[in-house]
Amino acid sequence: MVSAPAIEVSDLRKSYRSRRRRRPAVAGLDLNVPVGGVHGFLGPNGSGKTTTIRMLLGLIAADSGSMRLFGQPVPARLDQVIARVGAIVEQPRLFPAFTGRRNLELLARGIGAPRGRIDQVLTEVGLGDRADDRFRTYSLGMKQRLAIAATLLKDPELLIFDEPTNGLDPAGIHEIRRTMRGLADRGRTVLVSSHILSEVAQIADTVSIIGRGRLIAEGPVAEILAAGGQQAVRVGVADPARAEALLTSAGLEVGSAADGMLTVSPRRRSQQLDPSRITELLARQGLYVSELTPIRADLESVFLDLTADEHLGAGSGPTDRVTTTAARHAITEDRP
Ligand SMILES: Nc1ncnc2c1ncn2[C@@H]1O[C@H](COP(=O)(O)OP(=O)(O)OP(=O)(O)O)[C@@H](O)[C@H]1O
């Protein structure tokens, strides 16, 4: 039996009233987070990530759409699944003058978690040796790791972190990344939101990229890269000027690099680039290709490309949506 995804969201909508009109924050969002691994929930500032997370956790009401956590509809049955979910949406209240351990003891008592859990969660976030130092002496990364430890007290299967690396320095970001990866490696599902793709790309197994409250792309990191990243080639040819004119008139976008190589890409992202067609076009005119190398875009440029319209504040027309085969398969398979 296929187990239900950790998170399933379908056609989710929420708008806020501002100056006599309603502005959509989440505009028909679909989201599918499989059980296990780290899932990056990515989108530019203001694209609706926090609003979505708050709706999933029952902190605000959706206007319409459906949401499920481990197959249970929320908010209707949130009480039945909330014990399986830990989240940091806002900073938890931790007392600066108390040690890390004391802070956790107070929180554990509040939720009825056994005292034995405290050492386990401190170890899990790598704070075992600093547990008896006061919270105020912790670095920002350590403070955030203690907040993560607090969410682990009730031993949740799904962890939701909204921009957990905000305000941290590179060392702190690294600590949190390592902590999140470790949590997933020990069998939990981690949803982490970020507006900076590179912050989660290294540790995410799958990602959803959203813009203006809608899904733009989703799937395994490698497939998102393949879908968006192999759309240019470097071409070496003896007469670059002639080759450039030829390829341009064949409808391709051509740039020339300082080393005399040409960069060839399709004019529109929806078009496929066929390297063998480039070789053929040039060979027919007696121009023989000495080198043809695919340019692999990194995930950050794929992200910027996919969300370009959202950054520029373009109209809200339909967006090119890349759903990788695996992700599309998962969606159809898991829905009733
Ligand atoms: N309480 C609110 N009242 C009015 N508008 C809101 C409210 N909360 C969010 N919004 C608006 O909804 C949109 C989505 O905001 P949201 O915080 O969900 O985005 P986000 O992707 O989490 O962005 P960020 O990375 O900046 O946190 C934004 O335009 C925001 O200004």
Image: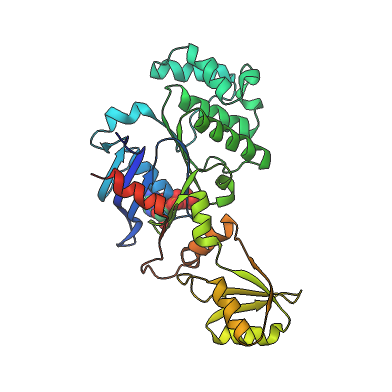
**Residue 133 in sight in this render:** no
Residue at 62% from the left image edge and 82% from the top image edge: 283
Towards the viewer: 166 or 125? 125
Task: Give the image's coloring scheme.
Answer: rainbow
Q: Residue 2 location, x and y as percent?
A: 31, 36
Residue 81, image x and y in percent? 31, 30
Q: Residue at 56% of width from left, 87% of height from top?
A: 249
For residue 71, above or below residue 231? above
Quarter of the image containing the N terminus? top left
Residue name at image x 54 percent, y 34 percent: 180
| Residue 268 position (above or below residue 201) | below
Q: Nearer the viewer, residue 289 or 19?
A: 289
Observer-nearest of 247 and 100: 247
Q: Would you say 155 lies left or right of 253 here? A: left
Can you say which quadrant of the picture contains the C terminus?
top left
**Side of 73 where 34 appears, left or right:** right
- Give the image location of residue 219, x and y in percent: 44, 50
Position of residue 298 measured from the top left corner of the image (x, y, whole percent): 60, 57
The answer, for residue 152, to whether it is visible in the render is yes
Residue found 36% across the figure and 69% down from its top: 317
Residue 61 to residue 48: above or below:
above
Decide which of 50, 40 is in the foreground and name it: 40
- 300 sits left or right of 41 in the view: right
